[in-house]
Amino acid sequence: MEITAKDVGKLRDITGAGMMACKKALMATNGDIDKACEYLREQGVAIVAKKASRIAAEGAVWASISADKTTGALVEINCESDFVAKSDVFVALCGTVAKVAADNKCADVEALKAIKTVDGTVDELITAATAKTGEKISLRRVAIQSASNAVEEAYIHMGGKMGTLVEIAADGRTDANTADIVTMAHDVAMHIAAFQPPYVRQSDVPAEIVEHEREIIHQQLKNDEKNAKKPEQVLVKIAEGKLGTFFKENCLLYQAFAKDPSVTIEQLVDATAKKTGAKLEVVRFTKFVMGEGIEKRTDNLAEEIAKLSAK
């Protein structure tokens, strides 16, 4: 099939690879974007994270944590403009909806909208905010994390552009050590926002993902001329070593802590456990990026002027 400049540009936007490398990858994979991304990796071309899920809608991600720290809620509410997203009406709505979600441990959007507050149901609050701002406002998603023996903590980045919610199992938690545990949990939530790891630990990575990564690494080694004379068993051992690097890059516990790269997140948790006398463990986390996966309408000024001129 014919590979157009638009196709090449799209792959370059997704991967950050050079134009010629992108064209070669598309030609080798018959124009399949996903296969072309893998082809680039197999050839040893360093690619950046996909940009296809760039933030494309306005609104905010908001969080609420229960007073006893055992329940946390993360919500995303969308609107049409950044101006409204920063308004007092919208910010107040986000705070209210997040708190209602946490108070009721409600992880279903439709069920959350039906919950009654002193000023009406959540759905009615959204309708009222829509009327005040003149923009369509919608509750897109909600997540709940709750455990009786845990500390839930959240971090909201850039006024709602991203939100993370982390759960730390805390056996031995007391009134005296809770503040230290919460501080550590907040730092971990902030780190997740900064580095966005997909998994907590190695055992969380699906077997098929591990095997796929192993195949990619193996193919990279085979395509490197420096390895041409190396026996297959040697390449296998090298691949396993590189797979360890994959786990360090993609699993939260093995990453260098954002605020102090001399320690890993796992070491940070262990140090806090030693300090507080509690048994601490990162159980899970949730991350929302505002507008992720929603395509924003874009206006072409030149086209609009042309349309008006033609009338």
Image (tube, rainbow, N blue to C red):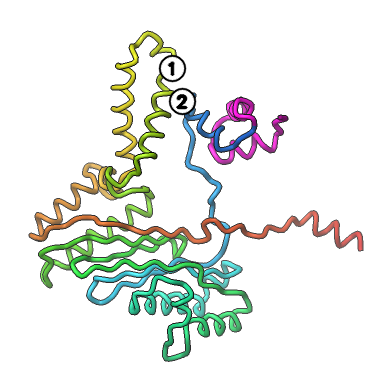
Q: CA distance from mark 2 to mark 1?
A: 8 Å
Q: Quadrant of the N terminus?
A: top right
User: Which amino acid lies under the numbered mark 2 shown in the image of this protein?
Assistant: Gly
Secondary element type, mark 2? loop
Q: Identify the residue at horizontal 43%, vertical 60% (top origin).
A: 288
Horizontally, residue 17 falls left or right of residue 71, namely right
Q: Identify the residue at horizontal 56%, vertical 47% (top origin).
A: 52
Residue at mark 2: 44
Q: Quadrant of residue 57?
A: bottom right
Q: Quadrant of residue 31?
A: top right
Task: Provide residue 247's location: percent of width, then percent of height.
Answer: 31, 39
Residue 248 forms part of the magenta stretch: no
Residue 224 — which label? 1
Q: Which residues are magenta?
A: 1-30
Residue 9 forms part of the magenta stretch: yes
Residue 124 — which label? none
Closer to the chain start, of discs 2 and 1, is 2
User: Which amino acid lies under the numbered mark 1 shown in the image of this protein?
Assistant: Asp
